[in-house]
Image (cartoon, rainbow, N blue to C red):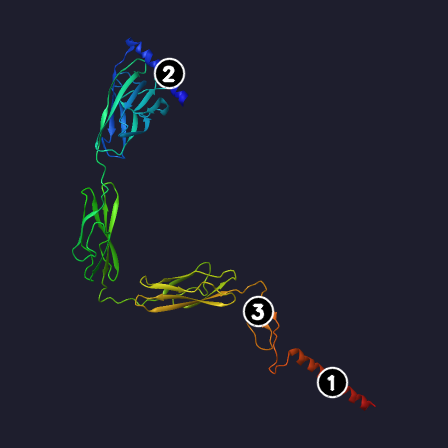
């Protein structure tokens, strides 16, 4: 870029001297002027300064030209510059240093694509510093202007002035807040943003009057319509001149309709079990269900939706489910009038399947134990008389042997 700038600047100097020594070829005059948009700005605003060309056609077109803009760095900060008139960016070299911005325009096609009519040669952006109100001047010089035939052009230059106004106010306070059909608490203070009020059933809309402290700010009242038997947040939003906002809130409780009858609808419209299905499928009038869970699932999330939006739902259970057991879960629908309906779900979690003995399902005296994993284990039990099993079996064998031997002896004697 630096080499390119040097080359372009060299070409500009060459063109300048060539134009300077060819007075017989001199063309017309072009006027270079600056304009600021907006013409009045505030600290923090970005201002666009346009470099305007007039008299271009009468001067035979503009194929080259240099413009230097000088500004007050204490009040403005340079941001960027771009070429105007739809020309290629390569035709404009920009050099910003100190309090000056230098723009060098040179048509790289040899003049054939130069400016042919009045236009904006370039735009330069500046940011307004955080300064007091006043003005900021832009001065400009123009030199080295030439037409499409490489003839010099006389360039007159004029600057412009930017007005700097006070920063926009950020004051978003209320000067007053009053309610004609209710009493707010505490008493209004611009630094207090939360208030409460209670109204009878007959008051359906809160009548709020609010005024902003700053003349450039606006105060808007939102949601003044009140819900019977409930609490409504009536808000006042103050928008400051600079866009900052502040919200004041009045929590208004309105009495119920004295003729209102609370709903007794305590029916669920659905039961949801994350990742699993109810058996049988849900029906509002069916209150007992089962879900089957693998051993690896120790907790399940249950949720229920009430058929009446004024009812609430409570879930009891679903955590720390025991393996090999029925785990009861309750989904309770509570109607607006407080009546309840209970839906029961049995969560059957599978037993451990690693061969370990977890639970005993049969443990009667003298019988085998059956574990939850299906393993049969012998019990160390005794008959009701207290005799060990092994001794009872031994006596039975001895008795049987004695009976068999006696019968054999008797038979032998008869044979004799």
The picture places residue 405, in percent across and down from the top left corner, at 76, 85
Q: Which residue is mark 2?
A: 10
Residue 123 seen in the current view: yes
Q: How many marks?
A: 3
Label 2 and label 3: CA atoms lie apart by 99 Å
The picture places residue 34, in percent across and down from the top left corner, at 25, 24
Quadrant occupied by the C terminus = bottom right
Tell whether label 1 touches label 3 (CB within 8 Å): no
Does residue 307 sit above or below 92 in this rendering? below
Counting residues from the start of the chain, the first of labels 1 and 2 encountered is 2
For label 1, count other residues whose C-alpha is less than 10 Å away and answer few (under 14), some (14-19) or many (20+).
few
For label 2, count other residues whose C-alpha is less than 10 Å away and answer few (under 14), some (14-19) or many (20+).
few
Task: Please give the name of the residue rendered at 48% of the width and 68% of the height, measured from the top-left corner.
Answer: 326
Does residue 116 sit above or below 302 in this rendering? above
Label 1 and label 2: CA atoms lie apart by 137 Å
Q: Which residue is mark 3?
A: 371
2 on left or right of 359: left
Does residue 303 sit above or below 23 in this rendering? below
Task: Please give the name of the residue rendered at 29% of the width and 21% of the height, measured from the top-left corner.
Answer: 68
């Amino acid at each position: 870029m630096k080499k390119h700038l040097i080359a372009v600047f060299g070409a500009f100097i060459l063109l300048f001297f060539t134009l300077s020594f060819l007075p017989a070829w001199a063309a017309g005059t072009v006027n270079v002027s600056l304009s600021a948009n907006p013409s009045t700005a505030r600290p923090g605003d970005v201002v666009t300064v346009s470099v305007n060309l007039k008299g271009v056609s009468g001067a035979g077109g503009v194929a080259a030209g240099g413009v230097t803009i000088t500004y007050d760095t204490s009040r403005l900060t340079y941001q960027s510059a771009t070429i105007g008139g739809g020309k290629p960016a390569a035709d404009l070299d920009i050099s910003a240093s100190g309090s000056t911005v230098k723009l060098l325009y040179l048509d790289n096609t040899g003049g054939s694509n130069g400016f042919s009519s009045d236009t904006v040669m370039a735009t330069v952006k500046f940011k307004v510093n955080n300064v007091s109100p006043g003005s900021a001047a832009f001065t400009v010089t123009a030199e080295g202007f030439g037409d499409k035939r490489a003839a010099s052009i006389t360039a007159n230059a004029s600057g412009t002035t930017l007005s700097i106004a006070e920063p926009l106010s950020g004051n978003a306070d209320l000067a007053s807040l009053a309610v004609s059909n209710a009493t707010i608490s505490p008493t209004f203070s611009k630094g207090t943003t939360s208030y409460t009020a209670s109204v009878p059933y007959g008051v359906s809309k809160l009548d709020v009057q609010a005024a902003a402290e700053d003349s450039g700010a606006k105060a808007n009242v939102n949601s003044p319509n009140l819900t019977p038997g409930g609490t409504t947040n009536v808000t006042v939003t103050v928008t400051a001149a600079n866009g900052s906002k502040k919200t004041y809130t009045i929590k208004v409780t309105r009495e119920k309709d004295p003729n209102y009858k609370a709903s007794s609808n305590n029916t669920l419209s659905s039961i949801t079990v994350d990742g699993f299905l109810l058996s049988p499928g849900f029906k509002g009038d069916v209150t007992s269900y089962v879900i089957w869970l693998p051993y690896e699932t120790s907790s399940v999330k249950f949720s229920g939706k009430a058929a009446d939006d004024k009812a609430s739902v409570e879930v009891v259970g679903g955590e720390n489910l025991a393996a090999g057991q029925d785990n009861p879960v309750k989904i309770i629908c509570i109607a607006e009038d407080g009546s309840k309906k209970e839906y029961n779900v049995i969560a059957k979690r599978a037993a451990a399947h690693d061969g370990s003995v977890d639970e005993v399902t049969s443990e009667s005296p003298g019988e085998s134990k059956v574990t939850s994993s299906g393993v049969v284990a012998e019990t160390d039990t005794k008959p009701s008389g207290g005799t060990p099993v092994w001794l009872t079996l031994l006596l039975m064998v001895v008795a049987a042997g004695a009976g068999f031997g006696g019968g054999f002896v008797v038979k032998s004697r008869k044979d004799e």
